[in-house]
Image: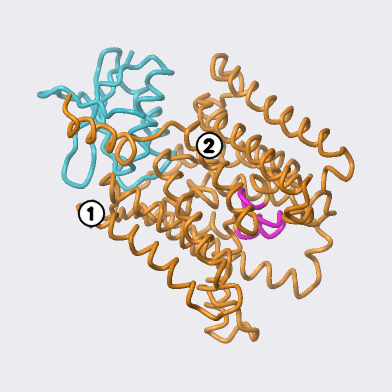
Amino acid sequence: MSDIKKAPDGITANHTLDAKGLSCPMPLLRTKKEIEKLKSGEILEVLGTDPGSRNDIPGWCSRSGHEYLGEKEDTGFIRFYVKKK
Amino acid sequence: MSIGEKFNEVYDSFFKKTWSPMTGGVLLAFLAILMVEWKRPWGIVGGIRNWADWFFYGIGFYTETPDHPLFHSGSMMDMGLLAGAWISAVLAREFAFRVPPMLEIWKGLIAGIFMGLGATLAFGCNVGGFYSAIQNLSASGFTMMIGLIAGVVVGLKYIYWEMEHFTPGPAGPTFLGNLPPFLGWVAIIGLIAAGYAYTSSEVEGANLMPGYLLIGAGIGFVFHRSRLCMVNGFREPFMTGEAAMGKAVAMSIILGALGIGLLKFTGLRGTGLYVETAFGWGSLVGGFIFGAAMVVAGGCGSGSLWRVAEGQIKLWVVIISFALSNSLFRHWFEANEWMEKLGSAVFLPDILGYGGTFLLVIAAMFIWYLVIDWNEDSNALVIEM
């Protein structure tokens, strides 16, 4: 039974992907595509509304080697943070 | 830790945190067996087709009155699933209406039409045509599985192509995301009360409705809590290599097949239950069409329905389109007496015996489990963008 990882306070992203309104598997696929645009060590912020992303994005990070930094709740959506390997 | 703190921890584990897919798969098998013990196997498409039949009857397109949705087994299972998934979503504060970009609405509409066609050809969606079919020892479940896998690859390639050529555009609003969790407990009481209400009904078959409703609600609750998703189980080995859902579905099918198979072996349930004339091209082609469409839709029969209860508007479009399309195709096929020509009804124990059939189910699911588990490390099946 998985716990939600909170992103550290003050985290700033180099790039933001708006995946609000998208449902599985589009938020993860767009995240996979978007992170290719970043340099190693840069942080991608993904804005999403699909609760499934809470499992999909951390799971993909652990498989692909990118670092999942956590999430932040916002009004009506969630901010996910991924650091490129 | 005080007893109060322990209570909160246990409560969170059951009602807030996401369960593992394997937990969901095992519990789903238990509930699928329970459904057959109650009366008949679990299915999805028969219920939503009943709702669509009423729509077409209401506008005068059909002349025959459909079964009452409150006294139709499939309809009550689906209502239960919706209720159970909604209860889970509200308790975990994960319910909200989420309006997707227009591109997603169109995808849902078109994918739903193809899901309706695929489910007609295969005598069911991924549940009735594949999951429950194999658990009921019908050969058509295996042919649909082959079709589903091929279809999923095509659907995934379409999504990759779409991402290169289209951007989804702005999403609509997200609203009603702050429903208080106590509404979930109110709904549980309402479900139990609805079950009791049937006991005083004199309508034929009313005594069976509480089981369909409450076991269906259990299925919806388990699906949402574990986010168990059969599309994910088929798709992820080709998309990211992830195998957790696929392994959970494989295990769930084995457990369910043993439980339901024994009910048939002992004569407690008829061997013909969910053994349809679909073994052959019907389930193969139907599985292929359904598999491709469910990837584009973002949900299969069961996955779309529990996401409806979570408030995802794209899946509302999928389910409405799927139901209407399936009703029309089924009506058309039945009018032309084509349903019997889609394949043959093959009850595997008639050929292999019960022992041989159980071995076949276990071996087939074990091979699938093994391949996707190996692929999780090797990524050999992953299709790159």
Q: Secondary structure at mark 2?
A: helix
Q: Quadrant of residue B190?
A: bottom left
Query: Number of marks in the image?
Result: 2
Could you tell whether B299 is left or right of B93 in the image? Answer: right
Subunit ID for the residue under disc 2: B
Q: Residue B182 has which mark? A: 1
Identify which amino acid the numbered label 1 is placed on. Phe
Q: Position of residue B247 (x, y in %)?
A: 57, 29
Q: Quadrant of residue B14?
A: top left
Q: Judge if badges 1 and 2 mark residues of a common chain.
A: yes
The letter of the cyan chain is: A
Q: Quadrant of residue B365?
A: top right
Span shown in magenta: B116-128
Query: Magenta span has B120?
Result: yes
The letter of the orange chain is: B
Identify which amino acid the numbered label 2 is placed on. Gly
Front one among B290 and A4: A4
Q: Position of residue B382 (x, y in %)?
A: 56, 24
Q: Residue B25 has which mark? A: 2
Q: Secondary structure at mark 1?
A: helix
Vertical placement of residue B145 versus A67, above or below: below
Q: State the colouring used for the structure image.
A: by chain
Q: Residue B81 has which mark? A: none
Subunit ID for the residue under disc 1: B
Point out the tag, 1 or 2, that comes first from the N-terminus. 2
